[in-house]
Amino acid sequence: MKNLLIALFLVTGTISLAQKKDCKIDFEEKTDSTYIKKTIEVLIHERVFGNNKEMIFFSLLNSEGVPMLGLQQIQKSTEFIPAMCFDKNSKIIFQLENGKFITLINSSEENCSSLSYDAETKSNIKVLTNYFLFLKDNYEELKKSPVALMRISYVGEKKDIALKNNINSELLKVTSAPSAYFINYIHCIE
């Protein structure tokens, strides 16, 4: 019985360690007066429909002990793409698989997408990058339960996205696990 308990403990410990992803840090600066650490971007959502393509990436940032979620949304289309903006009332709401809701609030006053043009593919490209603040009372829940749904509140518009367990990107040829993003990476900025 004692050997069975030891074996069970070792297997459980190995599984929990194997589930955490290695931290890939994009930027880290530590001085006497500042501390900033940022993870690389991970693909969370991809949608390809005809000539319209959309990708959303997450990264995590720790700035002076304040954890933040970085969101980058890239849209590419041969058609007109309307501007997307965040303001002080914008937020991201996550519904976890355990039924709890987690809200992140916008860290800036106003931020709108930038437009560029790809002459080779004759496509418009819109990029929107923003940071959202975690609230202390719900931060720990993100470590425990996968995310089922995400609602992004823009100025005058909301977008709901079901986060998949796995994405095999058609555009980037990478794989990711969006629903387990916080479980896998939030430890990287603590």
Image (cartoon, rainbow, N blue to C red):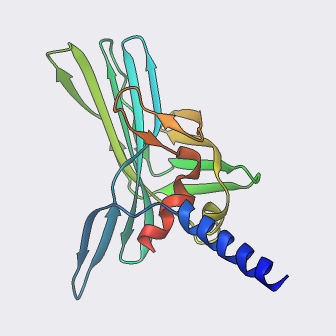
Question: In screen coordinates, is 111 left or right of 121?
Answer: right
Is 57 situated above or below 75?
below
Seen at 66% across and 63% down, the residue is 144
Which x, y percent locates residue 93?
A: 60, 49
Q: Position of residue 111 (x, y in %)?
A: 34, 45
Tell me if residue 112 comes above or below residue 106 in the rendering.
Answer: above
* Residue 158 in the image: above or below residue 104: above
Quadrant, the N terminus: bottom right
Q: Position of residue 18 (x, y in %)?
A: 54, 63
Residue sticking out furthest to the left: 119
Res. 79 image quadrant = top left
Residue 114's x, y, as percent? 26, 35
- For residue 183, which quarter of the picture? bottom right
Q: Residue furthest bottom?
A: 32
The residue sitting at 39% across, 17% down in the picture is 52
Please name the residue shown 40% across and 26% down the image: 170
Query: Is 174 on the left or on the right of 21, as rendered?
Result: left
Is residue 139 visible in the rendered image? The answer is no
